[in-house]
Structure formats: structure tokens, C-alpha cells
Amino acid sequence: MATVRDIREKAGDERITMLTAYDAPTAGIVDDAGVDVILVGDSVGNVVLGHETTVPVSVDGIAHHVGAVSRATEDALVVADMPFLSFGVDEKDSLENAGRMLKEEGAEAVKLESGPHTVELTEKMVQLGIPVMAHLGLTPQHVNQYGGYPRQGTDQAAAERMLELAIEHEEAGAFSLVLEHVPSNLAAEITDALDIPTIGIGAGPHCDGQVLVFDDAVGISEWTPTFSEQFGNVRAEMESAVNDYVSAVESGEFPADEHSHEESDLEELY
Ligand code: KIV
Ligand code: NA
């Protein structure tokens, strides 16, 4: 069983692998492959639940998926992504929502989309025994503020501010930091400045680890961001299986005798 300490100790040493999973069979596949961290991302909103963004994801909603993933994971560290407004509004609610992921759903840590408002909250969670993965750069819960998904930290002032926030979150006790959609030289500088590992997505090759959305990585998603890579073509496999099923039922090829229960000794009914 990987712990947050195992992940922290890999920084600067061994590369860290992280993928999302939202359900038990997927978590089983990811875990069996030896992935270090499974993130039950709020990307479940747009990847699985048919929403446009992650904004509508609820605490009950993410909890449902965290439970499924935790039950199917033996070795990886399971991290629950805290949804929009489930943290940062009220301290008591923030702590209870995050604590629930560990206490009731089997996660071992939470991830917070971070900013100036999460430094103290991170410290408080860590004091209470809730390990926190920080997340800087593009934080998709701000989509309405950004008006899209622009790259972050592209000017000197923004880059300096991001480095400062990264250090503040490390000091607050975060065990790792996701860097999303930032220039690779900025990701390299932040990685150098921190003792905790950085885990990149759209952040270049210099982070300590990498995270992708499962459906993008295996090729289920119809559309994949340019910073991602399809390591398989699972969607094509699924489409072909469903097409074959439809043809087989329509043609009467399936089900055949071999798929059926033996006939009973029923007398003719009419
Ligand atoms: O929700 C998610 O999948 C994420 C990762 C892409 C970091 O936050
Ligand atoms: Na997320």
C-alpha cells in the first residue's frame, strides 16, 4: 500500500505515475499496472457524467466514485479531488467534506485546487490528519473566471506568484503539487525549488511525475488535449464490439444454443 510518505520520498529520485479512475474496474486496471497514485478527479464531471465542466460536481457525487475506486485499489495511493465550493467557503464544511473522503470512502488524501485561500486550510487539514495534494497553474474550477482554459504563469509576475504559492503550500504541509498547463521552464523552476514532488499535466518533462485523465490516456475520449497522448485506442475497440453485438442480435447469430440454459422438461404450454 503506497502512502503519502512513499510519494514524497520519490521526489527528485524516481518518477511518479498518476492516472485518474472513477470506477472499480478501471481502478483495478490502473492499480494492477503499478501506477503510484489514483486520482478520483472532479474531471468525472466532464469525462463521465456529461457535464461541460467540473463546476457541477457535488460532494456526494465525488464520494460515490471515491468509494468505488478505494474498494478496488490495493496498492496505489487513492486521492479524492475536492469539488468546486466543497472547500474554501467555510472551514468547518471544508474539513468535514475532506474528512469524509478518508473516513467514509477509503481515500488516503485529498487534492485541492490551490490558491492564496488554501494555504491555511491545507495546514489545518494536515494537522488533523488529512494529507493534501496541492494544485497550481490552470485550476479548471475557475473556468468561469478565466473564460476558458488558458495557460497559466506565462508572465514574470504570475510565474513569481506561482512559485511563492508553491512554497507556501509545501510549508503548509502539502505532500505533493500538481502543476497544470504551465510553461515547462516554470514547472522546472518550481520542481527545483520544492522538496515535495511536482506532478505535471501539460507542464513539460521536468516535473517529478505525470498525471493524465484515464480516458484520454487509453483512447476512450472522443477528443484529447494536445498535451495528452493516446497510448491505446480503446474507443475503437468498444465501438467494434458494440457493432458486432448489434449485428449478431439482428442477424439471429446471437444468442445461439451454446449461450442458452438447457431446456427443461416442461410440457408444452399451448
Ligand atoms: O480532475 C482531474 O482529472 C485533475 C487532474 C487532471 C489533475 O484534476
Ligand atoms: Na480536478
Image (cartoon, rainbow, N blue to C red):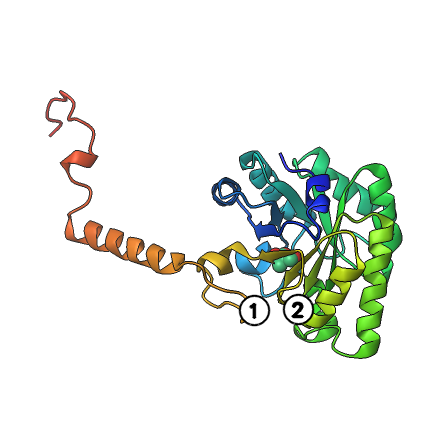
Asked if residue 90 can be seen in this view, the reply is no
Across and down, in percent, residue 116 comes to: 86, 61
Question: Does the beta carbon at disc 2 come under 8 Å from ligand 1?
Answer: no
Q: Judging from the image, what secondary structure is the residue with disc 1 in?
A: loop
* C-alpha separation, residue under disc 1 versus residue under disc 2: 9 Å
Residue 113, image quadrant: bottom right
Q: Check if mark 1's residue and mark 2's residue have beta carbons within 8 Å.
A: yes
The x, y position of residue 37, in whole percent, is 62, 46
Residue drawn at x 16%, y 35% is: 258
- Quadrant of the image where one finds ligand 1: bottom right
Residue 257 sits in which quadrant?
A: top left
Q: Residue at x 73, y 40 (%)?
A: 5
Helix, strand or loop at label 2? It is loop
Q: Name the mark on residue 227.
A: 1
Of the image marks 1 and 2, the number of the one nearer the N terminus: 2
Residue at 72% x, 57% y is 84
Is any atom of residue 38 visible in this view? yes
Quadrant housing residue 244: bottom left
| Coordinates of residue 51 in the picture (x, y in percent) | 57, 61
The residue sitting at the front extreme is 13
Q: Which residue is mark 2?
A: 181
Label of residue 117 in the image? none
Amino acid at pointer 1: Phe
Disc 2 marks which amino acid?
Answer: His
